[in-house]
Image: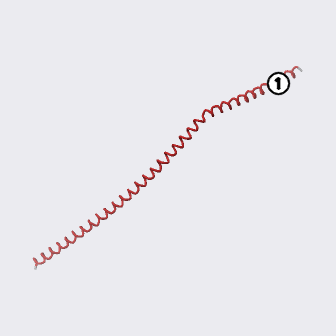
Amino acid sequence: MKDRDNTDLWTALAIGAVVGIGAALLARSRQDDNDLQHVLKRLKPTRKRAARMVKNARRVVSRGAHTAGEAGEEVLHASRDMLHDLRANARDIVHTTRDELEKVARDSISDARKAARRARRTFR
């Protein structure tokens, strides 16, 4: 029976320890909840300020993006206008050069014909 009493005693001790540990953990978790609530209360104004700052930052970024988009469109239109002018000027240069080359070619042919006529007169 002595062994049985020892076993009962150790069993009761183990059960008491488990119950005591459980109670301590429950009490501590309630304390942590209170601490957590306290920290959350202290952080609430900071959260509100952060939300306001994010809202303002969102507005500023949105305005900046809108402005950048408009500036990009202006640059795009300006570059298209410049490209159009460049093409027109290049076309004018090509036409003028072609006209001058044709004139030079006609003059060269005319001079060659005159030279051929002179040469023919000399050989006759």
Residue 21: image location, x then y, percent: 75, 27
Which quadrant of the view contains residue 77? Answer: bottom left
Q: Residues within 10 Å of mark 1 (few under 14, many from 20)?
A: few
Q: Which residue is mark 1?
A: 12
Front-lying residue, 32 or 6: 32
74 lies left or right of 51 = left
Residue 22 sits above or below residue 83 on the image: above
Q: Secondary structure at mark 1?
A: helix
- Extreme-right residue of the structure: 1
- Give the quadrant of residue 15: top right
Please indicate whether residue 104 sits to the left or right of residue 83 in the image: left
Q: Residue 65: x, y in percent? A: 47, 49
* Quarter placement of the N terminus: top right
In this rendering, the count of numbered labels is: 1
The residue at 66%/30% (across/down) is 35
Is the C terminus in the top left, top right, bottom left or bottom right quadrant?
A: bottom left
Residue at point 85%, 23% (across, down): 8
Q: Looking at the image, which is closer to me, 84 or 100?
A: 84
Work out whether 4 lies above or below 82: above
Query: What residue is shown at x 41% (from left), y 54% (from top)?
Result: 74
| Kind of residue indicated by mark 1 | Ala
